[in-house]
Amino acid sequence: MTALSDILHLLVTANLWQATLAAAVLLLLPALGGVVSERSGVVNIAMEGMMLTGAFFAVVADLALHNPWLATGVAMLAGALMASVHAIVSIRFRADQIVSGIAINIFAAGLTVFLINRIYGLQDVGHVTQSELLPDIKVPALDQLPFIGQVVFQQNVIVYVALVLLVLTHVVLFQTRLGLRIRAVGEHPMAADTAGINVYLIRYGAVITSGLLSGLSGAFLAIGVANTFVPNMTDGRGYIALAAMIFGKWTPFGAFIACLIFALGEAIYANNSIIHISQYLLSMLPYLITLIVLAGLVGRSIPPAADGLPYVPGSE
Amino acid sequence: MSEAPLAVEMRGIVKRFPGVLANDHVDFSVRTGEIHALVGENGAGKSTLMNILYGLLHPDSGEIVIDGKTVHMAGPREAISLGIGMVHQHFMLIPVFSVGENIMLGREPVTGPDFFDRRRARAAIEDLTKRYGLALDPDARMGDLPVGLQQRAEIVKVLYRGASILILDEPTGVLTPQESKELFSVLRDLVKVGKTIIFISHKLKEVLEISDRITVMRRGKVVGHLITKDTNEEEIATLMVGREVLLRVDKKPAKPGGVAMKVEDLTASSDRGVPALKGVSFELRYAEILGIAGVEGNGQSELMEVLAGIRRATGGRVLLADRDITTMDANTERDAGVAFIPEDRRGTGLVLAFSIAENSILGRERTAKFSWNEFVLKLVAIRDWARRLVKDFDIRTPSIDVAARNLSGGNQQKVIVAREMGGNPKVLLAAQPTRGVDIGAIEFIHRQIVKERDEGAAVLLVSAELDEVRSLSDRIAVMYEGRIVSIESPDTPEERLGLLMTGGGTRAGAA
């Protein structure tokens, strides 16, 4: 019973929710990318690899250029580059998109370790100095609000960016011509093609967007939350983002809610010093929730009809 | 009519696919303001030609002239801008989108930076539907509409893009007779306002009813240009198939033998668990064809499945000669001499990824003919068998190693028919044996079914086509709501059968 009351105590602290939101954003960015990519009909499980690549290049660029903004840009480009590999393989060459995604994830893990050795030899990657990290920003006045102030308005700059991107993705997908076309391509590419829409262009754009967003998340992780790169530092977040996307029924806000749930588990684990549950059990929490979601126990969600199917003009 | 200028002229179109010459120097022209039918069997190259006209496929050679100008079709965009619209056989509609979104897709009205303007979309659709008398609710979800209205949405979609030349690929294939009538009146109205219509079909009655001129294709070539009012079904069918075709089944009177199968008070449930058979009884005799007439969904499918051993009966008995086979599975039944042509050839009848040879022994792979000790396949024997079936049943294929997936619908069906009839069954259960199959193959399958009967087999036939049931059967059982309501002779007038099929008959059934 003490464990339960410990958790209840924890749940009313602003610290916990502040950490939850930050952790959720790490998942939200690749999840949004996944939503865009899969809405266009390209299954994307390569967020993990794109994020890891982004994290690595963020640190490399920041150490070299001493500018977190430029470093973030480099990270996004790196993510986009990985994404375009996935795009070419699965759109142009019509390869199995799951296999391509797994290949990219494994490739990214190997590439980053290889590059560490090439660039830094046997030493550490090195640490980014405090002044060259992505800054935390307190929103004047609003940050003084009780509870909400600390949770929402004392966050890293990327958190605000991500929340804007969340709304933007939703509006683009469901209110604009572009969004209508992305969804049409993901539901029935031949219908879109016969209506004069360039299926390939839309799909390339959507997959590369997912790379940009995953790269951004990697930058946030490496030079926002942490200050260095360690091998495999994304720690499965790309996969959890994938689960969040499915849990959220391929919608931006649905994915966001799923990210918050997963992030809450992670934040509780991070605060385990003040509650008395085995930390090993707690560390399983986000993954356990992921499994439950993927098994379809929390409402069945229906993917876009043409998700994962390469488009061959003139055939359905 | 003859002075009308040409809306479309395609000259010397050649299109080659791996192993097939789909279009072989095709010349095709359509006059402005006419309904032009393009007919031919499946695989004759009609759809290929139209996909080329619509820019979805690119010809290897040949030229396309639209309204007097030679054009290059890089893609559907060019075709649309030249006023060509296509209603595909399989609708190009997105079920989860609204009717309005579907119609607007690709030419969406936009407000502000890039916002989809629903208000203007709705106004544009209302304007179109009013102008052409094609009522549609723009806010309805496409997937919720009946097929007839979905097709109407496709036509409005094409008109919205400013099409003056409409291509309709097998538009009536999915429609009920009533919906087809409505479609025809829509097409006539469209021609009145100056549209040109290309109507692809292999249903000859319709072609004669709706078209002004007809172009006939066979195996990639144009084999005839006809003027509708000067031709008839037989002439078109002969051109399509390349030889004279019997549109009527030629058969001698049946000489029924003893009872082959006896069904007593059979009951069964549908997939949804609702009673589908509510006490079906009949006797099927050797050397006769018993046809089951009925509107689809009145228990015919379930009856065939129970008899074939792939659905469990909830009550009643099925006797094969004197042996109770009610609870037997498909394998045991097959061994007992019951053959089954299922209605869903792609899902149940064939393994699409398997070759013709492999498909030709499905379910018979354990027999001594095709394996040693039910374990090691006798590959040579299997290949010989498959070659014989291909020859005897006129399956058109380059080899027996071709995957079933790559055969035309008619040839897929022939593979099943060949497999099921090749084993000289005592009882043949044929469910929709010619659905989606073209004339030449229909004629062939009909002859094979009659031949089975003449060789002494008992044939139970289910078909949604009343014409087919009437022309093939020696007796007709009418099914309605899970019961056989009457057994009639094959010369019973269509009106009476129609009445019985909808629950209208009064006379008690008598064999």
Image: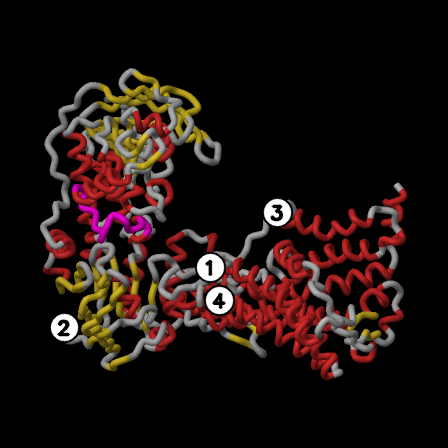
**From the viewer's perspective, is A311 left or right of B412?**
right
Task: Mark 1: give few (<14), some (14-19) or many (20+) Cα within 10 Å.
Answer: many
Residue at point 25% right, 60% down? B19
Position of the C terminus of chain B by quadrant: top left
Chief secondary structure of the magenta span? Answer: loop
Position of the N terminus of chain B by quadrant: bottom left
Q: CA distance from mark 3 to mark 4?
A: 29 Å
Q: CA distance from mark 4 to mark 1?
A: 13 Å
Q: CA distance from mark 2 to mark 1?
A: 48 Å
Residue at point 88% right, 47% down? A276
Q: Amino acid at mark 4?
A: Val
Q: Which residues are magenta?
A: B392-405
Q: Between residue B392 and residue B233, name the one nearer to us.
A: B392
Residue at point 75% right, 72% down? A123
Chain letter of the residue beneath label 3 in the structure image:
A
For residue B133, say whether it is visible. Answer: no
Pointer 3 and pointer 4 on the same chain: yes
Q: Between residue A181 and residue A256, name the one nearer to us.
A: A256
Which residue lies most toward the top here? Answer: B322
Instruction: Name the secondary structure under disc 1.
Output: loop
Instruction: Please identify the quarter of the rendering in which residue B212 is found.
Output: bottom left
- Residue B343 colored in magenta in the image: no
Pointer 2 and pointer 4 on the same chain: no
Pointer 2 and pointer 1 on the same chain: no
Q: In this figure, which colouring scheme has been used for the structure?
A: secondary structure
The residue singled out by tag 1 in the image is A309
Q: CA distance from mark 3 to mark 1?
A: 22 Å
Nearer the observer, disc 2 or disc 3? 3
- Mark on residue A296? 3
- Mark on residue A89? 4
